[in-house]
């Protein structure tokens, strides 16, 4: 009995170490995935505030202006629309340029600005191709004097968001590969601790599938436990981060985070299962002399 207990201690220790190691790797993958979601949502939020400006013609009537308001309130591509009268445009210009409020009108005798609409489009339309297709018919509408695209801003934001997405994709792919290697090595250690049991079962005539089954089931359970540990830590981090900075809660919604949690659990199970399968097959092929 004493010998059995002494032998079981290294096995339990190796399983505990494997579970903690897998949990740490899954935690890192979960953090990267949540960062990717936050970056995507932040990019979409920024892009949903850009679009184009429609400047009304000097002959535009109130009826034409009201028609344009109705058009953009019902347009599927609009995320936000703001109308500014000629006086409001003048006031905003004076405020921006730090000029005296009456200087430009005193110099010209009139308000040189016209009413305008600032149209912000939804993130999926915030690229130059889509914006050009949207504004092409708008330029032909009655009462429209000019349409100004925020082209430089659109290109700059899209380039930044795309570059960040590429970087995060490469980081996630590299971490996924590293996680597989680390988890595979960890699982191999747990199987290595029971290599003599595998050889003993081979000697008494156990089939390969019969020998593999308990190792695979055990490592599936380890993967599930490790995933739940990682998910619990991620939930704690999200709660704490949301209490410190509420903006994080807006960027990472819980329904999106739940998909990451499900992915962490699935990845943990798959990698642990494959690692157990490969490691068990390796020791099934070894002779007794090669077990040392």
Image (cartoon, helix red, strand yellow):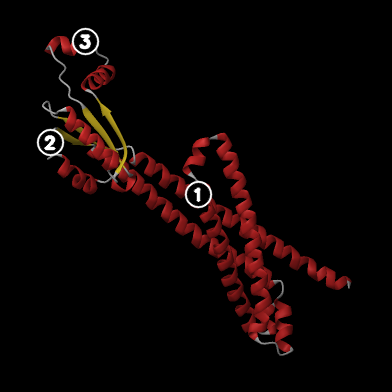
Decide: is 130 above or below 2: above
Foreground residue, 243 or 75?
A: 75
| Residue at image coords 70%, 65% | 15
In the rendered image, the vertical position of residue 284 relative to residue 244, given as above or below: below
Among the 4 quarters of the image, the one containing residue 218: bottom right
Which x, y percent locates residue 165? 39, 50
Name the foreground residue: 277 vs 54: 54
Residue at horizontal 55 percent and vertical 53 percent from the top: 28
Q: CA distance from mark 3 to mark 2?
A: 31 Å
Residue 175 position within the rendered picture, expressed as x and y whole percent measured from the top left: 50, 57
Q: Residues within 10 Å of mark 3 (few under 14, many from 20)?
A: few
Question: How busy is the neighbourhood of tag 1: few (under 14 within 10 Å), some, or many (20 plus)?
Answer: many
- Identify which residue is drawn at 49% across, 51% down: 256
Disc 3 marks which residue? 102
Q: Residues within 10 Å of mark 2 (few under 14, many from 20)?
A: some
Asked whether residue 219 is in view, the answer is yes
Q: Where is residue 261 shown, x and y percent of the image?
A: 56, 55
Q: Earlier in the sequence, mark 1 or mark 3?
A: 1
Q: Secondary structure at mark 1?
A: helix
Find disc 2 in the rendering and name its residue: 142
Q: Which residue is mark 1?
A: 34
First of labels 3, 2 by sequence position: 3
Q: Pointers 3 and 2 in contact (CB under 8 A)? A: no
- Report which quarter residue 43 is drawn in: top left
The picture quadrant where one finds residue 135 is top left
Which residue occupies the extreme front position in the image? 63
Instruction: Give the side of residue 86 with respect to residue 255, left or right.
Output: left
- Left or right: 140, with 214 as reference point: left
Question: Is residue 221 left or right of 179 when viewed as pictured?
Answer: right
Q: Earlier in the sequence, mark 1 or mark 2?
A: 1
């Amino acid at each position: 009995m004493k010998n059995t207990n002494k032998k079981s201690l290294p096995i339990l220790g190796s399983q505990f170490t494997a579970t903690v190691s897998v949990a740490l790797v899954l935690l890192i993958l979960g953090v990267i995935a949540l960062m990717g979601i936050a970056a995507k949502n932040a990019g979409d939020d920024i892009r949903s505030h850009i679009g184009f400006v429609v400047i009304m013609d000097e002959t535009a009537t109130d009826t034409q202006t009201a028609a344009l308001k109705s058009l953009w309130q019902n347009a599927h591509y609009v995320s936000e629309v703001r109308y500014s009268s000629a006086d409001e445009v003048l006031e905003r210009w004076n405020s921006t340029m730090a000029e005296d409020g009456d200087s430009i009108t005193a110099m010209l005798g009139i308000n040189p600005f016209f009413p305008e609409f600032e149209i912000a489009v939804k993130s999926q339309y915030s690229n130059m191709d889509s914006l050009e297709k949207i504004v092409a018919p708008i330029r032909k509408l009655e009462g429209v004097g000019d349409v100004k695209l925020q082209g430089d801003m659109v290109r700059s934001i899209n380039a930044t968001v795309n570059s960040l997405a590429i970087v995060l994709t490469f980081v996630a792919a590299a971490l996924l590969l590293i996680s597989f290697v680390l988890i595979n090595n960890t699982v191999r250690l747990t199987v290595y601790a029971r290599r003599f049991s595998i050889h003993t079962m081979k000697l008494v005539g156990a089939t390969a599938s019969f020998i593999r089954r308990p190792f695979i089931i055990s490592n599936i359970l380890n993967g599930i436990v490790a995933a739940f540990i990682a998910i619990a830590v991620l939930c704690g981090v999200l709660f704490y981060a949301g209490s410190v900075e509420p903006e994080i809660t807006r960027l990472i919604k819980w329904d999106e985070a739940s998909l990451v949690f499900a992915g962490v659990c699935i990845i943990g199970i798959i990698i642990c299962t494959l690692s157990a399968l490969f490691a068990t097959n390796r020791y099934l092929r070894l002779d007794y002399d090669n077990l040392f």
